[in-house]
Image (spheres, coloured by chain):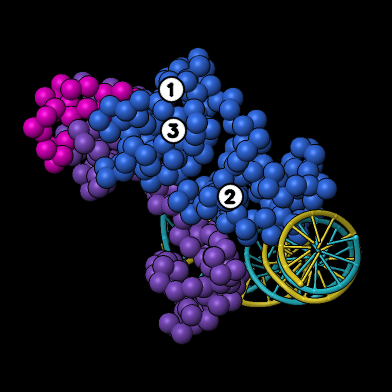
Chain colours: A blue, B purple, C yellow, D cyan
Amino acid sequence: MSNKKERHALIIDIIKHEAVSNQWELCDKLNQQGHHVTQATLSRDIKELQITKVATSNGKYIYMIPDSNHLKDSMLLQGEHRASVIEQRGYISLEFSGNIAVIKTRNGYATGLAYDIDMSHSDAILGTIAGADTVFAIIREGTTRDEVRTLLSQFIPSEKIN
Amino acid sequence: MSNKKERHALIIDIIKHEAVSNQWELCDKLNQQGHHVTQATLSRDIKELQITKVATSNGKYIYMIPDSNHLKDSMLLQGEHRASVIEQRGYISLEFSGNIAVIKTRNGYATGLAYDIDMSHSDAILGTIAGADTVFAIIREGTTRDEVRTLLSQFIPSEKIN
DNA sequence: TGCATAATTGCATAATTATTCTTAATTTTG
DNA sequence: CAAAATTAAGAATAATTATGCAATTATGCA
């Protein structure tokens, strides 16, 4: 079988990082992770998670998470699974200077984390730049630092965020 | 028949203001406006316009225009726009936050654009940093955003600057 | 102008996605 | 604890969406 909550978390993770173009493809990817479900279930999951399919510029379709503020709390990755999927992004620290968030990571992890922040399509962040171990994220005017922390907590266990 | 450009504009307008849940429904609405097309055409239009279908909280589906950044990026990549995008050094968008100008470019173009800005030796810009598709430019205190736009118009057709 | 090429569209249908119906599992309640 | 209620999920299928193909129209260009 397949635990629904866990599966949902995994679906979000897959959608965010890979180009999935239909539900059977997602089915396969889940199978490889030990989640055995049918397309029918995925159709329901996609509805529940408010995932959408959109055309890309190369003429294909991909599934995507529309807009992070459309995501409900219940959909966010949580608990043990989130820890395992997410705790390894090399995150070290978060500091602010003016409207810039400076995120320190272990060497090599900054690009990946910046990519994840970009892919969240959050309105809070205008853009990011990553070096080897540092991410600069520019915060939209009117956005609070707490909103940025909340966004980051999608990727980093919130107890680690200072 | 139905003029494609006009129809596309109308489709966007309808999608933005009404809850359309499938393509035949959209078909009807277009008919009422004198645009006679089949579902097949609308499927193509929706692909081209990168419109998506998402579940709503009441369990229905609606079509929607996705995240504007996403839309802007990929629209620029298409067809007739392609050449002009290259002439624009990959420029996509300009936004400000505090004393930082955040310039989005197509992947790979940011470094070149930042170099050009540096080489202008403008007093308005203290310095730039570029990633793959983003330039951060730090603006001197007391410099207006319009002055920055004017500077950028040396490199980018001013009508493209938002 | 006339030919060649590209763009647009409908039709039919393939491909994909959503849902109904059913059963099993899990949780709640008396 | 057992019955009732809720939730989850598969199989089959209905509903919806995407696309190959052919016909038609528009566009460029020598």
| Side of A156 where B76 appears, left or right | left
> How far apart, in angstroms, are the residues tagged by discs 1 and 2?
25 Å
Work out whether residue A100 or residue A79 is closer to the camera in this orientation and state it: A79
Disc 3 marks which residue?
B107
Q: Is residue B134 magenta?
A: yes
- Three-letter code for the amino acid on which mark 3 is drawn: Asn
Tags 2 and 3 both on a single chain: no
Residue depicted at 50% across the width and 60% down the height:
B51
- Helix, strand, or loop for circle 3? loop
Asked if residue B77 shows in the view, the reply is: no
- Check residue A75 in the rendering and tell me which mark sits there, or answer none: 2
User: Residue A34 location, x and y as percent?
Assistant: 80, 39
User: Residue B113 location, x and y as percent?
Assistant: 30, 28
- Three-letter code for the amino acid on which mark 2 is drawn: Met
> How far apart, in angstroms, are the residues tagged by discs 3 and 1?
28 Å
- Chain identifier of the residue bearing label 1 in the image: A
Residue depicted at 55% across the width and 25% down the height:
A89
User: Residue C7 location, x and y as percent?
Assistant: 49, 60
Work out whether residue A131 or residue A143 is closer to the camera in this orientation and state it: A143
Q: In terms of image quadrants, where is residue A142?
A: top left
Dots 1, 2 in contact, CB < 8 A: no
> How far apart, in angstroms, are the residues tagged by discs 2 and 3?
31 Å
Disc 1 marks which residue?
A93
User: Residue A9 location, x and y as percent?
Assistant: 64, 43
